[in-house]
Image (spheres, grey):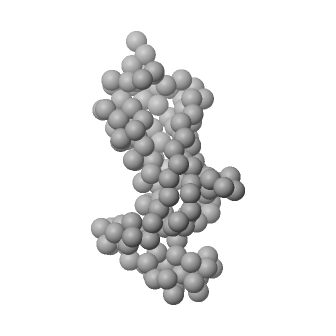
Amino acid sequence: MEKPKINDVFKYNFSFTDEEVKMYAKISGDCNPIHVSENYGKESIFGKCIVHGYYSISIFSKIYGTILYPEEHILISQNAKYLKPIFTGVEYTAVFTVKELFHKKNRVLYKNEIFEKITGEIKITGESILMNKKYYNWS
């Protein structure tokens, strides 16, 4: 795999299921009815249940930990701004763009975004810094 360069882009398509959201609610302890009660979701401002914020950005962890430079990838920091809700049964595209390289520290700053695949509407934006001494070594 080539070392990352400024403006490199990686895309990954995904979706969430109701069953996954319920498992996350159980594991995290966040059983807010907006996530797990169909009746409550219908009466909410969203008209249906929404995926937990932290669970929705877990897709970033999946990509960093298992797909994009997975060996020795260490998450240093991550932030997210939730612009629009994420729903189950909808296809999304996660887009990762290399924004900055920190050569001496073996780190990369990524812009992380989630878009609804069909409409192209942005749902979440943020940044992550990752360290990887194996792949982020420009010396």
Comparing 63 with 102, the one in front is 63
Q: Position of residue 71 (x, y in %)?
A: 31, 32
Residue 112 appearing in the image: no
Q: Is residue 30 left or right of residue 119?
A: left
Is 90 placed above or below 32 here?
above
Where's residue 53, x and y in %? 48, 63
Q: In this rendering, is residue 37 above or below 77? A: below
Is residue 62 placed above or below 137 in the rendered structure? below
- Residue at left offset 47%, top offset 31%: 108
Q: Is residue 49 left or right of residue 105?
A: right
Residue at 33 percent across and 23 percent down: it is: 134
Question: Would you identify the image quadrant in which residue 11 lies?
Answer: top right
Q: Residue 72, percent across and down?
A: 30, 32
How far across and down, in percent of the image, does residue 40 sit?
51, 85
Left or right placement of residue 69 versus residue 7 in this view: left
Residue 50 visible, this orientation? yes
Q: Quadrant of the C terminus?
A: top left
Q: Quadrant of the N terminus?
A: top left
Residue at the image point whose x is 50% and y is 35% from the top: 109
Query: Is residue 131 positioned above or below 18 on the image?
Result: above
The image quarter containing residue 87 is bottom right
